[in-house]
Image: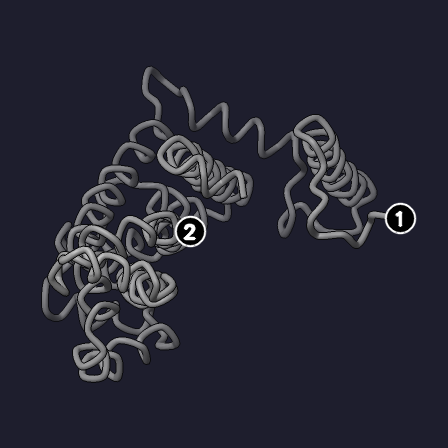
């Protein structure tokens, strides 16, 4: 307990797994008690075992897997949107971070969107792009890129100036200082920004797929809600959470491999 409030003394992997498993187990026990006692109606909160049955049903029923099909559609949309977010957001953020004048001109156009209700843009995107795949990908793109660009800019600006000065003293041009000194030092934080952007897209996937989606986890949840199949609704939500967590863990592992010096600090 002497080190309970010490943020610099992290538990080892085994302790972290035990603590995490205990918290999940406690939540499941509490949820089960609510279901068994009837404190909360099953129409509002299905029991954990009913959600598991719904997952099994969605995973394989009458020779097909609705869950696998929906997951592949959602994952495909997210990957396409994620590629566009990275391809556009990272260069834009780097240019803004590298040039104070560009940042002064563009920031008033970018920064307010971080606080804007992106969901409110959905009807506008439907009006402009229709109800097809372009609208869904554009919605995911906008929802994530408005976070990525400022975070990349901040990552560039957070690099200590002495790296830029050292490269300049070695004869590099200003742009070479950015490319060869500043950007490599900023890459761990830029990677963090990309991880956040993908997490944001997972939170928006259900909204993007509410409108005329052929398939997808959002469409699956929406159909289940129409028929008051709340066990399937919860199953879909948990699948999205699991996929988002898996994406986060995978990208974090890649970051540790690429920048071991930063993750060991």
Dot 1 crowding, Cα within 10 Å, few <14, some 14–19, many 20+: few
Horizontal relation, residue 126 to residue 40: left or right:
left
Q: Is residue 229 above or below residue 103?
A: above
Q: Is residue 44 above or below residue 157?
A: above
Horizontal relation, residue 104 to residue 42: left or right:
left
Q: Nearer the viewer, residue 60 or 161?
A: 161
Residue holding disc 1: 2
Residue 112, given in percent of the width and then of the height, sits at 32, 80
Horizontal relation, residue 229 to residue 19: left or right:
left
Residue 91, given in percent of the width and then of the height, sits at 17, 58
Residue holding disc 2: 226
Write down the quadrant of residue 150 in the picture.
Answer: bottom left
Q: Secondary structure at mark 1?
A: loop
Query: Looking at the rendering, in which quadrant would you find the C terminus?
Result: top right
Residue at 28 percent across and 32 percent down: it is 72
Residue at 20 percent across and 62 percent down: it is 168
Which of discs 1 and 2 lies nearer the camera? The answer is 1
The answer for how far apart the CA atoms under marks 1 and 2 are is 52 Å
Q: Are marks 1 and 2 in contact (CB under 8 Å)?
A: no
Q: Nearer the viewer, residue 160 or 213?
A: 160
Q: Nearer the viewer, residue 145 or 134?
A: 145
Taking the image as drawn, is residue 232 in sight? no
Taking the image as drawn, is residue 161 in sight? yes
Q: Residue furthest top?
A: 63
Horizontal relation, residue 97 to residue 27: left or right:
left
Residue at 43 percent across and 42 percent down: it is 244
Residue 238, given in percent of the width and then of the height, sits at 52, 40
Residue at 76 percent across and 34 percent down: it is 22
């Amino acid at each position: 307990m002497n080190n309970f409030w010490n943020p610099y003394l992290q538990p080892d992997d085994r302790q972290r797994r035990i603590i995490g498993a205990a918290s999940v187990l406690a939540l499941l026990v509490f949820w089960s008690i609510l279901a068994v006692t009837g404190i909360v109606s099953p129409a509002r909160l299905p029991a954990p075992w009913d959600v598991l049955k719904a997952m099994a049903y969605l995973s394989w029923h009458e020779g097909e897997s609705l869950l696998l099909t929906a997951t592949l559609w959602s994952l495909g949309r997210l990957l396409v949107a994620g590629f566009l977010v990275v391809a556009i957001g990272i260069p834009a953020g780097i240019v803004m971070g590298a040039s104070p004048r560009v940042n002064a001109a563009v920031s008033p156009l970018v920064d307010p969107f971080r606080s804007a209700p992106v969901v409110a843009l959905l009807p506008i995107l439907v009006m402009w792009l229709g109800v097809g795949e372009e609208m869904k990908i554009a919605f995911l793109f906008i929802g994530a890129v408005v976070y990525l660009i400022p975070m990349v800019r901040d990552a560039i600006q957070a690099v200590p100036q002495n790296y830029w000065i050292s490269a300049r003293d070695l004869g590099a041009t200003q742009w070479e200082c950015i490319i060869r000194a500043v950007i490599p030092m900023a890459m761990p934080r830029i990677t963090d920004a990309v991880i956040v952007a993908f997490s944001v897209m997972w939170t928006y996937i259900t909204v993007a797929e509410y409108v005329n989606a052929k398939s997808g986890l959002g469409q699956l949840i929406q159909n289940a809600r129409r028929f008051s199949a709340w066990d399937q609704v919860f199953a879909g939500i948990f699948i999205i959470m699991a996929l988002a967590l898996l994406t986060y863990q995978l990208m974090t592992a890649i970051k540790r491999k690429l920048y071991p010096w930063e993750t060991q600090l």
